Image (cartoon, rainbow, N blue to C red):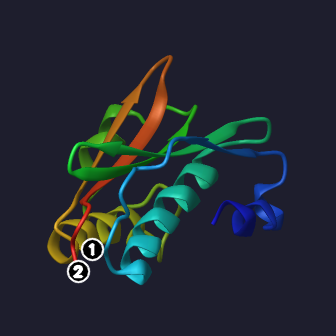
Amino acid sequence: MAAFYRAQPWTEGRRILVAGSSPGPGLVSDRTLVGRVLGNMLKNALEASGPGDTVTLECAGRGEEAEFSVRNPQVMPPEVRRQVFQRSFSTKGKGRGLGTYGMKLLAERHLRGRVSFDSEPGAGTTFRARFPRLTA
């Protein structure tokens, strides 16, 4: 996924860093749906970033869960934070707004996971998706 987005012309000037450790014992889940959740997380982070920014992807084991996180240095205003998971809400214009809504829907309704985020000055914005290691 990182290689795919690095090759997109609109990400020029942004750095994608893959960090972290393996989640340990494998994650058994629907590869396509997990990929859609993680792809939306990464695309949103890159779109929110500007030239010179670094977007960091991380994967780690958290007990019986695997956690994927995507961080960018930008901070969301409070009014955006309150609406970020609402269907059709977008800061990017008309015809957008299914990315974060779709992430939450797929993760929580279909993969028994959960999606959350933090956005604070000095720390940036981090979206997290946690999945039970065995969800098949």
**Mark 1 belongs to which amino acid?**
Leu
- Horizontal and vertical percent for residue 85? 27, 57
Q: Quadrant of residue 118?
A: top left
| Mark 1 nearby-residue class (10 Å; few <14, some 14–19, many ≥20) | some
Looking at the image, residue 129 sits to the left or right of residue 64; the answer is: right
Q: Earlier in the sequence, mark 2 or mark 1?
A: 1
Mark whose residue sits in front, 2 or 1: 2
Q: Which residue is mark 1?
A: 106
- Taking 106 as reference, is 27 above or below it? above
Q: CA distance from mark 2 to mark 1?
A: 14 Å
Secondary structure beneath dot 1 equals helix
Q: Can you see residue 88?
A: no
Looking at the image, residue 20 sits to the left or right of residue 100; the answer is: right
Looking at the image, residue 30 sits to the left or right of residue 14; the answer is: left
Question: Which residue lies most toward the front here?
Answer: 25
* Residue in front for this viewpoint, 97 or 34: 34
Please report the residue visible at 71 percent of the width from the left and 36 percent of the height from the top. Answer: 53
Please report the residue visible at 39 percent of the width from the left and 51 percent of the height from the top. Answer: 24
Please report the residue visible at 35 percent of the width from the left and 57 percent of the height from the top. Answer: 25
Question: Which residue lies most toward the top here?
Answer: 122
Please report the residue visible at 76 percent of the width from the left and 56 percent of the height from the top. Answer: 11
Q: Quadrant of residue 43?
A: bottom right
Task: Give the quadrant of the C terminus.
Answer: bottom left
**Mark 2 belongs to which amino acid?**
Ala
* Residue in front for this viewpoint, 11 or 115: 115
Give the numbered dot on residue 136.
2
